[in-house]
C-alpha cells in the first residue's frame, strides 16, 4: 500500500502547474486511486477485527492499519477539494467569465492557489502515511527467530517424507566412474 501511495504522490506532482488548471479526469483518477487505497486499508482492519485478535501481533496490526485511516482520510479531503474546484471552475466560473478576461484571470489565480495548497497538503500527508505504513510493515514482520521456529511447523510433511525416504549414502555406481574419468 505504501508503494501505491508513493505512486499517487508522483501523479499529484505531475499535475500541471499554475496557471494551468488540471483536467478533471486526471484529478478524478487520483481520487479513485486514493479511494482504492483507503478501501484496502479499511478492508484489512475489518478482516483483522473479524478474527479473534488473540495474538498481540494481530492487535498491533489493527492499531497500525487503523492509524493509517486518519491521514488517508485527510488526504482524500484535499483531493476532493481539488476535484470540486476544478469542476466548479470548468463548468461554472469559466463559462460565466469567458467574456471578461481580467475577471477570469482573477478567478483562475484563486483556484490555482487553492489547488496548489491542497496538492501540497495532500502530498505531505501521503508522504507521512506511506512512511508510517512502511514502518508498520517492518514492525509487524515476523522476527528471524520466529520465522525459523515456525519453518518446521509449516512444512512437517517435507521433514517426515525426508525421514521416511532417506537419500542413498553413495551415488549410483554408473554415475561415479563416468564423472571421475571425464575430469
Image (tube, rainbow, N blue to C red):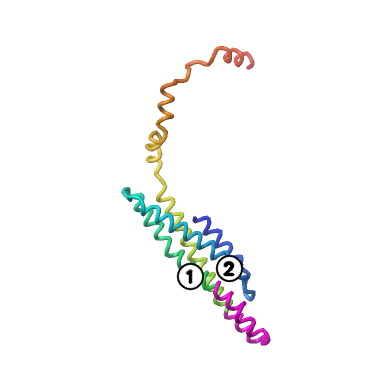
Pinpoint residue 109: horizontal percent, then vertical percent.
Answer: 60, 80
Please report the residue visible at 56 percent of the width from the left and 77 percent of the height from the top.
113
Q: Nearer the viewer, residue 70 or 116?
A: 70
Q: Nearer the viewer, residue 166 or 117?
A: 166
For residue 27, the mark is 2
Question: Secondary structure under badge 1?
Answer: helix
Pinpoint residue 139: horizontal percent, then vertical percent.
Answer: 40, 51
Pinpoint residue 76: horizontal percent, then vertical percent.
Answer: 49, 67
The relative height of residue 136 versus residue 86 in the rendered view (above or below) is above
Please report the residue visible at 36 percent of the width from the left and 53 percent of the height from the top.
50
Q: Is residue 20 left or right of residue 78?
A: right
Residue sitting farthest toward the front: 50
- Which residue carries the number 1 mark? 77
Q: Is the C-beta separation of discs 2 and 1 under 8 Å?
A: no
In space, the residues marked 2 and 1 are separated at their CA atoms by: 13 Å
User: Where does the magenta region start and end?
Assistant: 83-110
Q: Nearer the viewer, residue 55 or 32?
A: 32
Residue 71 lies in the magenta stretch: no
Main secondary-structure element of the magenta-colored stretch: helix
- Quadrant assignment for the C terminus: top right
Please report the residue visible at 47 percent of the width from the left and 59 percent of the height from the top.
39
Amino acid at each position: 500500500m505504501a508503494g501505491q501511495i508513493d505512486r499517487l504522490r508522483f501523479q499529484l506532482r505531475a499535475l500541471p502547474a499554475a496557471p494551468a488548471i488540471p483536467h478533471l479526469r486526471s484529478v478524478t483518477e487520483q481520487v479513485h486511486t486514493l479511494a482504492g487505497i483507503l478501501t484496502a486499508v479499511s478492508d484489512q482492519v475489518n478482516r483483522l477485527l473479524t478474527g479473534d485478535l488473540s495474538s498481540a501481533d494481530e492487535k498491533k496490526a489493527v492499531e497500525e492499519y487503523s492509524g493509517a485511516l486518519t491521514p488517508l482520510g485527510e488526504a482524500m479531503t484535499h483531493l476532493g477539494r481539488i476535484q470540486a474546484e476544478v469542476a466548479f471552475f470548468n463548468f461554472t466560473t469559466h463559462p460565466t467569465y469567458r467574456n471578461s478576461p481580467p475577471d477570469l484571470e482573477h478567478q483562475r489565480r484563486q483556484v490555482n492557489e487553492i489547488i496548489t495548497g491542497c496538492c501540497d497538503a495532500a502530498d505531505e500527508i501521503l508522504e507521512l502515511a506511506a512512511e508510517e505504513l512502511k514502518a508498520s510493515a517492518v514492525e509487524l514482520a515476523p522476527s528471524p527467530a520466529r520465522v525459523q521456529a515456525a519453518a518446521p511447523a509449516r512444512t512437517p510433511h517435507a521433514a517426515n517424507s525426508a525421514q521416511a525416504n532417506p537419500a542413498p549414502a553413495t551415488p549410483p555406481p554408473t554415475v561415479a566412474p563416468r564423472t571421475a574419468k571425464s575430469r
